[in-house]
Each structure stands twice: as structure tokens, then as C-alpha cells.
Image (cartoon, grey):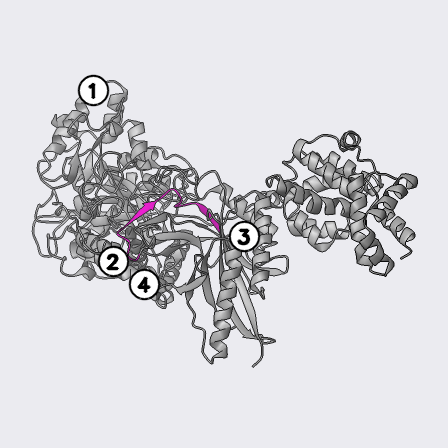
Amino acid sequence: MTELLALTALEAHRAMVAGELDAGEYAAAWRQAAGGDELNAYLWRDEGGGPSAIAVERPSIAPIAVKDIFCTEGVPTTAGSRILEGYEPPYTATAVRKLIEAGAPILGKTNMDEFAMGSSNENSAYGPVLNPWDRERVPGGSSGGSAAAVAGGLAPWAIGTDTGGSIRQPAALCGIVGLKPTYGAISRYGMIAFASSLDQCGPFTRDVSDAALMLAILQGQDSCDSTSVGLPKSPSLPDRGDLKGLRFGVPSDLTGHEFDAGVRAVFEATLEKIKDLGGEISTVSLPHAEHGISAYYVIAPAEASSNLARYDGVRYGMRAESSGDVIEMYEQTRAKGFGAEVKRRIMLGTYALSSGYYDAYYGQAQKVRTKIAGDFKGAFDQVDFVVTPTSPSVAFKLGEKTADPLSMYLNDFFTVPMSLAGIPAISIPAGLAQPAGGGPELPVGFQIAAPAFGEQKLLGAAFALEQGIGFDARPEGVPNG
Amino acid sequence: MAELEAVIGLEIHVQLATKTKMFCGCELSFGDEPNVHTCPVCLAHPGVLPVVNEQAVLFALQIAAALECEVAPRSIFHRKNYFYPDSPKAYQISQYDIPIAGAGRLGDVRIHRAHLEEDAAKMIHVGESGRIHGSGASLVDFNRGGTPLVEIVTEPDLRSAAEAASWARLLRETVRQLGVSNVNMEEGSLRVDGNISVRPAGSEELGTKTELKNMNSFRFLERGIEAELARQRELIEAGGRVEQETLHFHPEDGSLHPLRSKEEAHDYRYFPEPDLVAIAPTEAMLREARESLPELPAARAERYREKLGLAEDVAALLAADPETAGYFEASSQQAEGVEPRVVANWVTGELAAALRQEGDTTAAESKVEPAALAALVAMVQEKKISHGSGKTVLASLVAEGGDPTAIVAREGLAQISDSGELESIVAAAIEANPEAAEQIRAGNGKAIGAIVGAVMKETKGRADGGEVNRLISEKLGS
């Protein structure tokens, strides 16, 4: 069984298609592995013979763990929130439907920060997810359950969502690959909205090839999502052997800021590796990128304050008992149903959109966003990719940052600018480093960003770099392929 | 104090008669069982996204073309945020600063803008009051939620309640003839709100306006505006000031009630809807909208006046209803040697009256073929039958249909044109009414009616009224 679990999703797919691997046996092995979840990675698991809505007739694609932000018909979908406790959607998200139609059984729904708001998974109403490398540490967030499931050997691969870094950062903290595609590449239909102009679905995988395979399944225009356009061409599997002729830009406006020495060492070693592989390194300017966090924490809460207004206890989900009128029922339901971080962001967003403050906050933030997108455009005139560390630190301890929302928000420092610009970015594991306070080494992610719809080229470069780095560390007890 | 002039603008919500809702595939309906036309999108389940109904955009473009509005090359949607159970998303998707249609005109009234949005769900308040306050419970019917609406906003160009109601009728007919809405005020597919203020006559400045809602018929629209104008005039003449507020018209007693300020004090926190892209009508869409326009009431009325010589009121009456207009035109074309205005007078006068008696069918739906009316009018015009007999024939046509010539023959209604025959009947009538005859001789012309009546009775209306009058005058020397 360990052998089965050591296969990548691509290897398993090829073996199933060739008739060398029994799909039922393979799926059963993964169901059993998922059943041993000690990380609180899953909120719901298919125990075998799951609801008909998610049954697959001829599986030929590795079973998948799905972030609990994706609606799945007849299967509990909570978005990590108490307010959706017991909610079973009447429909299935387009991304999940595409995976099912491709032949992927659903292993389960993964834990997450409530409504994808968080960078540590400590904002889940259903308890934090533990990092498989060190169970006293966070897996990152908000897609922490998906990242921990893949890194911890509880799923061959998973999908998550990235609004300001929610795929890339947990992938980095868990030592796996996480891809945020171009905004519009994958349908958002059925993905519970946090910040609609930023949210994007993407894969968590063990390697870059698996990410390409899953992207090929997920991408595409969807008539249910007016903002979806798909990719110009279905991505093919990457096979690039070197980085010759490719130019990588380091944005000193971001990397010039202080961050963990261990992370910096791995980042710089990776830049050397790029040179070894024939790539060119230069400095690029993203003069407005450092304001990304400020703009993001206005735009995302503003959209969230509107997106989350529908949770009122009238039609579905939790309803607080109230003896008063409908307004009091709303208030009670939302007071009891939402956690502290969600409430904080609803208040921030409501304020930013208020009459008299709109121009100073939301309007201004949108201007910054346009400037940042312009910065990237300028940078991509000079280089093929922009590279940064994915996260300023390795996985931090549970509870370490919960008292200080601002320091928590800074986890997204390197990932937010790409989200605001709507461009694709991937995090690949680049090495191990000690936490700032010392202790066993933990994974460090390396982020590569490309121009909009440049996924194919991005995957090619990431693949070559991945081969060059040869990262093969795994948490203790997780089979290594 | 100078006389206070009324300044009125209207805001009209038109429910579009598309097949499906504005942002999802649910069918539109009226009067169905509650909550049967719903889906995850219009119930605002988590994760759903709106998709713009293309037919609604085409309908809006037709309205824009009919109102001669400028069309925005890229109009966008906003979210209007508010908590209320009739709004399942807790925001309405509407157009805000860049509507699909800008400045335009209908008749003498300038259009400020027209925009697309979605309707709210229907609230039913259980309890005696029928209103949310004081009701024991409220029910929500989401069938209506998400119905496409076009909101048309006029400039404050109307100067009286009657003018406002009459212009609103013109707008209703215009939209109805586009075929894009049922425009039924009782069913709510047409809702007209008024923005009302007064100012000293001759002043250019606008006074403080109030918004008047819930007038669900043209009669109530006129009455409501009238009442509000009276209230404002009274207030100002007593030295007071009009406060900006929203008033609810109560049709039961014609009274006006301010909506509670708490309900009105909204900060809608508008921001651009991130789930939708801009509406950018193609040249082909704009052309299709223009070419699909039928001849609209205002243009048709003008043609009737200018080209066919119809009186203004008759032209407006006919032009307002495309079916009757079509009937009139078909009949007029077949009425040889008869001026269109004569046929028009028959359609709006004698025929309309006869149809009302017969139970209010329309001319087009009646048994009177346009050709039959044409033949009938021609016979009267050529004095083959009297006007009175014409009405008798018309009554028969309305009841049974058929050919007027045959009816005239069957009923023996051909006009008595033989002077000899008529003379002896007139003589007999004078003899039978000596008092009237005496009065006529004494110079009282009005008394002639009694004798004419007697002649008509005798001839069963077949006598030519002009000839009868001439003969009586001749015999009595008046």
C-alpha cells in the first residue's frame, strides 16, 4: 500500500490508463490513508460509496481532497464557518464537477480558515489544522487543510483557493507545490466567495507535473461565471530541462524588506540554482508592490462585507433563536455564526465602502491595485518571471500570531501583489530552513510569477527548477515517491 | 406671493417580459404557487454567480432606442447593499454611475437615464395590517426575485398631475408596443413613482422634492400627485418648508404617509459588481434594437395628424393602441371616396360606443370587419342611408357581423330620397303636432325637434335629416 501512495497523481493516472493499477484498489488505499487523519485536515471524508452526486463511474484520475469552500451537492460544505454548519448545497461547483467528470473520486472536504480569511488555519470554526512537519506549527492558510493533506500523505493532491496567497503560502509552509492561476483561468462558480475580484481556484500537488495535469482539467471558460475566460491553450505537461534564455527578475522593493534569515538563505541559493540552469537574474522595480498589503486589506474585506451579507439565517445554514424581529434574528445569527476574524473584516469592509469614506479607502485601494498591475506589466517588459520567497517565514507556532492580526496579515506580503495584478504564480519547495527561533528545519517556498495567461511557460520554468533543486524531503512517516 | 408651479419628474420601473430572470435561468411567472421558480442563484446560495440575461439587454436597448437615449458603449453593474428578506444576497445588482441608457426624450419630456436591474422578491406580511409593522410573521415568495427591470428616470419636465398621468400613459403604450413588458400597473409590471416639488412660477430653481410611491394605477398616480402638490402648496403658503422624504400613497383613502425615516436612512455602499463584466453592445445589437422598433404612438399620432388630417385627440386615441390603429388603417384604405378622418371618427365614436354596449370588445376583436365598416361609412357619406340608419346597421354588425349592404336591404333602411313620399309624411307629422307647429310659426326654431322626431319615427330613421328640416321650414314658413 505504501507503494501505491508513493505514486504521484500523474504516475497513478498513467498506470490506471495502462491497466497496471486498479482504480478501486488505489482509491481505497487513499480512503484508508485519509481515514488516518491526525492533522484535522479533513472536515468530511468519503467513507466509500459516498453520495451519488460525487460517485465516479470509471476513475482514472487520482482521488482528490477538496477545500471545504467548494460547494458539493448533498455533501456538507461549511467554508470553515459555524454559520454554514449542516449546510448541504443543492449543486456542485464547476471545478469539482470537472474533476469528477475527468474521473477523480472525491476523498473528502478539507479544513480551512473561516471563509478563507486567514494565513494559519487557526480561524477555522472546526479547530486548527496541524502542520505535518511539526504538529505544534500551523500549515499556513487559508487552504491549510488541503496543503496538510497532500504534505501529510492524506491525499495525492488537492484543490484550494487563493485570494491573497491562500494556496501559495500553505504550499510553501508544507513543502509542496501550490499554483494560483491567472484570474479567470478557472471558473469560480460554486466556490464560496470571499473577495470576488481576487478569488481563484488552484491545485496543491507534490510536484509541478501534477499541477500541470490538474490545471489542464480545471481550466476553461464557464457559462456560469462571466469572469471566466479559460487559458488560451490547454496546458501540456512540462518537460523543460534547463532555464537557458529565461530572465528572472527579483523585485528589490519586496525582497529588500526584512524577513527570516533562513528563508533568505534558501531564496538566494535558489537564485544561484537558476543561474546554474542557464537562467539570468536581474533586479526589477515594482515601486507600488509594497503597498499591496494595504490595498488588499481594503479591497478584500470590502468585497467580503457584501459577499457574506447573505448569511442571514433566512434560507439555509444556522439560524439563531430570537424572540425579536427579523433584524434581531439577523444580528443574533451573524453574532453567533461568524468568528472574530470574519467579523473584523466585515467591519473593515463595511467602513471602507461607506458613503463619505469610499473614495479615501476603496477608491484609493483600487488605484493602488491598478498601479501594481502596471508595475508588473513594466517588469515583464524586461524579464520573463518575477521571483520572491513565497512567505517571509517558515511555518510558525500555533497561537504565535493570533493576538496580532497585523503580523498575521504580513504573511501575505510576497503573495498579495500577484493576486492584485491577477497574474499566475506558483510556489515550489526550494529547501529547508530553521525557524527564526531555532529548531528542526522546515520547508521554504520559492515563488515564480508570470504574465497573465503565461501558465504554460511558468510551469515549464518551475519544472526545470524543481528538477534542478531536487527537493525530496518529506515529513516523518510520509511515503516518498 | 407668486403662484406655485408644479415640477414633476417620474421614475418608472418596467418589468421585462423576458423568458427567464435577469441573472439566472428561472422562468418568469405571475400568480404561480410561491417559490417554485427558484434556483441556487436567485436564492443566493453560497458560491453562486450571476450571468446577465442577453434578452434583457436587447429589451433595454429597444427601450433606449424608443426613448431616443444615448447608449453607453460599456455600462457596468454595481451592488446596492441592504439587509432585507426580499433581497436574498443582501444586495441588489443594479446600474449606478454608468447606466446602459443616458439622455433621451419621449414626447415633450426629457429622459435622464434608463438602467437595468433585478427585482426584489415579494414579501407577504401575515396579519391584519398587511404591512411589516405589526404583522405576526412575514413570508417571502422568491418567484419574483431576480425579474429583470428597466428603471426609467425622467427630467423634472412635467407641470401638472394630469400631464404626468397622461405622459405615463404614453410611456406605457410605447413600452407595450415594443413587446418587452406587460406594463400592467395592477400586477406591478409597471410601477411609477413621482418626484414632486413646487416653486414660484417663473423661477428656474428647483424646490425641495418628495418621492411619492405606491400608486398602482394611472388614476391613483394623478390623485397622489395632486394630493402631494396640494400638501406642498399649503405648507409653503403657510410659511412652512417642504422636507425631503418618501411618501407612501394609500389608495383606500387617498392619503399620504411618510415612510419611517429609519427605513429610508440607507447607506447602500455601492461598489462595482466584481462578478460581472461590462455590457458592451455590439453595432449589430444596436442595429437590431433600432430596426425592431414598431411605429410608436407619438410618431403614429403625428402621421395621423399631418398626413391623414385627423383631429389631435382622435389621432392620439387611435395611435395609443396599435390594434385599433391597424383596424382604422385597414378600414380607411377600403372606404373609397371617404376621408380618413371620417372613418377615424366612426372608429373612435359610433363603433367604440356600440362595442361598449356589447361588452367592451375591441374593434379588432369584434365581428365588424374593417371592410364592412368601410362600406357602411361610404353608404352614409353618399347619403344612401341616413346617419341614424347607419348606427342601426352598425349595431347589427356588432351583434352578428355580416355585410352592411345586405343588412340595409333586409331591414329596408335605404334612405327615402323621393321628395313626394317624404313630403306627405312631413305634412302628416305637422298635422299630428299642432302645438309644435304653432311654436315654429311663432319663431321658436327649437320646437322643430318634435316634428323631425315624428318623421323619423314614421320612417324608422330612413329619412335624410337635412331634407326633413328643409321641408318643415318650407311648410311652416319659418
- Amino acid type at mark 4: Ala
> Label 2, label 3: how many angstroms apart (C-alpha)?
35 Å
Chain that bears disc 1: A
Chain that bears disc 3: B
Q: Is residue B53 above or below residue B204?
A: above
> Label 3, label 4: how many angstroms apart (C-alpha)?
29 Å
Residue B344, percent across and down? 73, 46
Residue that badge 4 annotates? A352
Chain that bears disc 4: A
Q: Are marks 2 and 3 in contact (CB under 8 Å)?
A: no
A123 or B20, nearer to the observer:
B20
A86 or A444, nearer to the observer:
A86
Chain that bears disc 2: A
> Label 2, label 1: how many angstroms apart (C-alpha)?
47 Å
Q: Secondary structure at mark 1?
A: loop
- Amino acid type at mark 1: Asp
Residue that badge 1 annotates? A22
Label whose residue precedes the other's in the sequence (2 or 4): 2
Badge 2 density bin: few <14, some 14–19, many ≥20, Cα 10 Å:
many
- Residue at 26% over, 36% down: A72
Which disc, if any, is residue B73?
Answer: 3
Q: Are marks 1 and 4 in contact (CB under 8 Å)?
A: no
Label whose residue precedes the other's in the sequence (2 or 1): 1
